[in-house]
């Protein structure tokens, strides 16, 4: 890769400066060279070298405004704002039309969370600058800090109009559209931008993301396709295209896209996992398992991969292997209610009811308050003969689901099992009142109660 003339000069200046430090000789640099050297060291976090360069620069060029402005930047970086502001006041008296004075003043205001004042300073800088794009971008950032997304978007758009290659501005524009839930407006803007710059792979990629957000997967894949045609090494566009193809159930094409990402760079656990999912959708069970196992080999801490293997074995009804892999996932994220729910379901399949009960309890403690969790939990306790605990669980559920027939029928059955017939009949009446059609829940889950004549008489009362 060839360096630009400016980059070559900067590299020469840096080499010359570092050589001077090693030999203790004093070389002459013009003030702009010193500015570039100082800013390079600041950008790379080597503040000691930046300070040495500033000291030498000011010794050689004591009246340089540029070096003093770099000093201001350094002071702001170190949060020495009062000293920086004092130095800016002195510089303003010398060069009141220097836009950098207003830009640095804006940086001070911004550090103090005085964003309106920062914007005012930047607007003054616009009167003296030739680099409108940079100042517009800074104004946009100040509006972002204030959560004024419409204004921020307006100034990032101005920035991009000045410099159509400023992709950070384009990303910020789309961020604003996304935050404001303006996907259609974002699409219209991107289409106008693409009309002017049809070979902008970044714009095509962002257009694809907008269509994906709107669930228009055909258009999404179409846009990502253009991004990959323009830049055949655009890894992100291939990944997004593959996700869109999955949504369209074009699993083989999705696999091809994911495979391309793995050819462009080292395989990621995400891509390996998705390839496994696609193979499973296509009925290629052996290949699916192979990619799931490659995923956990690539990233042993990726709980979603362990869960994918768990679900694979659940679908095969191989509960012994499923329990091994769900335990791996729980070991990584013990607060995930979905993992505990699987743990419970697998143990129930193995008829290990105590372990199943633990799983449902842990799922509840991790925040799962779905109706089916309460139902399955109470069923497990019923199978363990713990009727009182099962009733307690369902009474808790009534606080969240106050008019739920399934809870009422199960409470009726459990009270009958506990010999509390009056309470059982109360809940039976509730269930029949709410939903008569599903009263067969009693027959399926509580056959002895179903056979009782008194129960059949209550059911008959609601039949018509």
Image (spheres, rainbow, N blue to C red):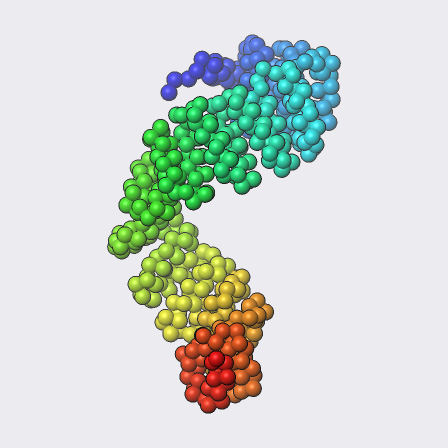
Q: Residue at x 45, y 30 (%)?
A: 191
Residue 116: % across, % down: 69, 30
Q: Nearer the viewer, residue 47 or 209?
A: 209
Q: Nearer the viewer, residue 17 or 199?
A: 199
Q: Residue at x 73, y 19 (%)?
A: 89
Quadrant into which the N terminus falls: top left
Find the residue positioned furthest to the front.
Answer: 464
In this rendering, the count of numbered labels is 0
Q: Nearer the viewer, residue 1 or 52?
A: 1
Residue 255 visible to the viewer: no
Residue 361 visible to the viewer: yes
- Image height of 409 relative to 233, above or below: below
- Image height of 436 relative to 63, above or below: below
Residue 268: % across, % down: 37, 43
Q: Residue at x 55, y 17 (%)?
A: 36
Residue 3: % across, % down: 42, 17
Q: Residue at x 37, y 64 (%)?
A: 323
| Residue 295 shown left or right of residue 448 in the figure | left
| Residue 464 shown left or right of residue 67 in the figure | left
Q: Quadrant of residue 242?
A: top left
Residue 17: % across, % down: 52, 16
Q: Quadrant of residue 344?
A: bottom left
């Amino acid at each position: 890769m060839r360096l630009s003339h400016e980059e070559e000069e900067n590299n020469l200046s840096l080499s010359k400066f570092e050589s001077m430090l090693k030999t203790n000789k004093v070389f002459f640099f013009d003030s702009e060279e010193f500015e570039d050297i100082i800013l390079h060291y600041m950008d790379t976090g080597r503040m000691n070298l930046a300070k040495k360069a500033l000291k030498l620069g000011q010794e050689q060029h004591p009246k340089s405004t540029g070096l003093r402005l770099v000093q201001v930047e350094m002071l702001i970086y170190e949060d020495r704002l009062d000293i920086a502001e004092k130095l800016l006041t002195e510089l303003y008296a010398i060069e009141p039309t220097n836009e950098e004075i207003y830009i640095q003043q804006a940086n001070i205001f911004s550090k103090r969370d005085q964003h309106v004042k920062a914007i005012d300073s930047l607007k003054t800088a616009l009167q003296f600058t030739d680099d409108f794009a940079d100042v517009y971008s800074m104004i946009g950032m100040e509006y972002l800090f204030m959560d004024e997304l419409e204004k921020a978007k307006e100034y990032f758009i101005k920035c991009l109009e000045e410099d159509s290659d400023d992709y950070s501005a384009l990303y910020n524009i789309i961020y604003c559209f996304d935050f404001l839930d303006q996907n259609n407006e974002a699409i219209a803007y991107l289409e106008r931008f693409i009309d002017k710059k049809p070979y902008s792979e970044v714009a095509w990629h962002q257009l694809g993301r907008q269509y994906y957000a709107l669930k228009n997967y055909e258009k999404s894949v179409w846009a990502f396709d253009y991004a990959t045609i323009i830049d055949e090494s655009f890894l992100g566009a291939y990944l997004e295209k593959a996700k869109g193809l999955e949504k369209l159930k074009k699993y083989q094409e999705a696999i091809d896209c994911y495979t391309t990402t793995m050819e462009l760079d080292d395989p990621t656990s995400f891509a390996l996992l998705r390839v496994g999912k696609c193979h499973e959708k296509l009925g290629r069970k052996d290949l699916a398992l192979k990619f799931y196992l490659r995923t956990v080999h690539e990233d042993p801490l990726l709980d979603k991969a362990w869960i994918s293997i768990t679900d694979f074995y659940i679908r095969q009804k191989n509960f012994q292997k499923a329990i091994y892999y769900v335990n791996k996932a729980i070991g990584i994220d013990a607060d995930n209610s979905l993992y505990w729910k699987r743990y419970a379901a697998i143990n129930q399949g193995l008829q290990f009811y105590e372990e199943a009960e633990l799983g449902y309890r842990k799922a509840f403690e991790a925040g799962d308050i779905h109706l089916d969790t309460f139902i399955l939990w109470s069923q497990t306790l019923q199978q363990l003969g713990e009727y009182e605990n099962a009733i307690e669980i369902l009474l808790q559920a009534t606080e969240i689901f106050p008019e739920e027939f399934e809870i009422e029928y199960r409470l009726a059955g459990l009270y009958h099992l506990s010999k509390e017939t009056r309470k059982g009949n109360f809940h039976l009446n509730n269930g029949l009142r709410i939903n008569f059609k599903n009263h067969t829940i009693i027959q399926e889950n509580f056959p002895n109660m179903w056979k009782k004549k008194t129960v059949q008489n209550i059911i008959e009362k609601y039949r018509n």
